[in-house]
Image (tube, grey):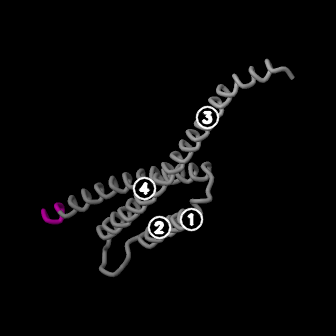
Amino acid sequence: MTPDFYTRLLSLLPALAGLGVIVALLAVVIFMRLQARRRRALRALYRGADALEHDLKECRARLERAHASMNVAPGVPAAGEADARTAVDAALRELLEHRLWLRDQADEANQHELDAAVAALDKARATLSEQLAALDSAQRALETAVRERIEDLSQR
């Protein structure tokens, strides 16, 4: 090998070092973006779980008010009251299981699992939101019917 070859090789070293630095920086940026995505997914999971728990408790309270409106005798549960309570309690237990999974497994979960969990929570909240809207509508109709019945009875 000639001295000319070594001279050319030495002249390429700064360019190769610069390329190495660029590749390293790119790897760091990619890693940071992946970590940020993971943190966003975890935050969304915790926020979604909190919101779903709030919605379920709100649902329970609304169902209790609706069943109280339909109650014909004190101490006698209204039709469907036990089923509704069981469904809400089951949903709250399932949510607790998800929270326990988050506590125990979130650090090892891959991004796909985290994204799927966020999507499942979002879907559950959307479904519950629709059901709460239907419950509100039914509650308003019931209150109107009760009011009209009371007015009819008072006019007699």
Q: Which residue is tagged 3? A: 21
Q: Considering the numbered disc 3 on the image, is that residue within a helix, a strand or a loop?
A: helix
Q: Which residue is tagged 2? A: 92
Mark 4 or 3 closer to N-term?
3
Q: Position of residue 21 (x, y in %)?
A: 61, 34
Does 153 lie within the magenta span? yes
* Residue shown at the point (65%, 29%) measured from the top left: 19
Of the 4 image quadrants, the one containing the C terminus is bottom left
Q: Position of residue 153 (x, y in %)?
A: 17, 65
Counting the numbered discs, the total is 4
Q: For the view shown, which residue lies furthest in the front direction?
A: 3
Q: Residues within 10 Å of mark 3 (few under 14, many from 20)?
A: few
Q: Marks 2 and 3, Cα distance to the nearest angstrom?
A: 51 Å
Q: Position of residue 65 (x, y in %)?
A: 30, 67
Q: Nearer the viewer, residue 82 or 124?
A: 124
Q: Nearer the viewer, residue 81 or 93?
A: 93
Does 110 lie within the magenta span? no
Mark 2 or 3 closer to N-term?
3
Amino acid tagged 2: Leu
Mark 2 or 4 closer to N-term?
4
Amino acid tagged 1: Trp
Mark 4 or 1 closer to N-term?
4
Q: Marks 3 and 1, Cα distance to the nearest angstrom?
A: 40 Å
Q: Is residue 74 left or right of residue 2?
A: left
The majority secondary structure of the magenta stretch comes to helix
Mark 1 or 2 closer to N-term?
2
Amino acid tagged 3: Val
Q: Which residue is tagged 4? A: 47
Q: Marks 4 and 3, Cα distance to the nearest angstrom?
A: 39 Å
Q: Which residue is tagged 1? A: 101
Q: Marks 4 and 1, Cα distance to the nearest angstrom?
A: 15 Å
